[in-house]
Amino acid sequence: MSEKFTVAGTTLYKGATKVRFANDLATRVKTLVKNGHDAIELFDLPKPMAKPEALAFLATQKLSKVAAEAVANKASEYAPKVAKPVTKAAKTVAKAVTKAVTKKTATKAPAKKAAPSIAAKAKAAKAAAAPVTVVTEAIATPVANAPATTEDVGVA
């Protein structure tokens, strides 16, 4: 909730006119004079008001030209912000930019050389291996404690 004030007006301080808010007219005027303010124009508000309401009230009062400008500038700070309408041309441009960016990022990078599969590696290893000689001759000398025939081993 915004703070409520009972006094509002303008003062000139070091060449700049500013809008002032307070709750006690006498104390505020005394403080402003003590601090070197000039052209003090303060008004008792008809009821306690928030800053935007007080600024609307001040706009209806008879103020100097400089003070009226200061009130108008301060009131613009409290005005609601209005979004600018989007034109058809702006929408078209935004759509084109989005499409171009999406297309550019969606392009594929150059393909890297694929790693060889396991089957290809096995085939290459087989081809590179030294030829294996298969021995099919029977051993001439018997091995100690070896069975004499395959039947003795239990092989069918």
Image: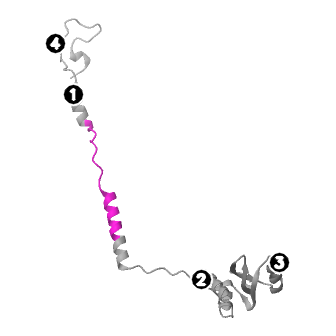
Near mark 4 (Cα within 10 A), the count class, few <14, some 14-19 or many ≥20, is few
- Residue 98 point in image, percent of width and height: 35, 66
In front: mark 2 or mark 4?
A: 2
Count residues near mark 2 (Cα–Cα under 10 Å), then give few for <14, some for 14-19, many for 20+.
few
Return the mark for residue 126: 1
Secondary structure beneath label 4: loop
> Which residue is at the far front?
15
Q: Are marks 1 and 3 in contact (CB under 8 Å)?
A: no
Residue 90, percent from left and from top:
37, 75
Residue type highlighted by circle 1: Lys
Q: Provide the secondary structure element on which disc 2 rests.
A: helix
Q: Which residue is mark 3?
A: 34
Determine if residue 74 is in view.
yes
Q: Toward the viewer: 5 or 26?
A: 26
Q: Are marks 2 and 4 in contact (CB under 8 Å)?
A: no
Tell me the crowding category of disc 1: few under 14, some 14 to 19, or many 20 or more residues within 10 angstroms, Cα based: few
In the rendered image, the vertical position of residue 109 relative to residue 144, given as above or below: below
Q: Position of residue 6 (x, y in %)?
A: 76, 87
The residue singled out by tag 4 in the image is 137
Which badge, 3 or 2, is on the more N-terminal residue? Answer: 3
Residue type at the position of mark 4? Glu
Residue type at mark 3: give it: Lys
Closest to the camera, between mark 1 and mark 3, is 3
Query: Which part of the image, by quadrant, shows the N terminus?
Result: bottom right
What residue is shown with label 2?
A: 76
The three-letter code of the residue at mark 2 reads: Ser
CA separation in Å, label 1 and label 3 = 103 Å
Q: Is residue 113 magenta?
A: yes
Q: Which residues are magenta?
A: 95-118
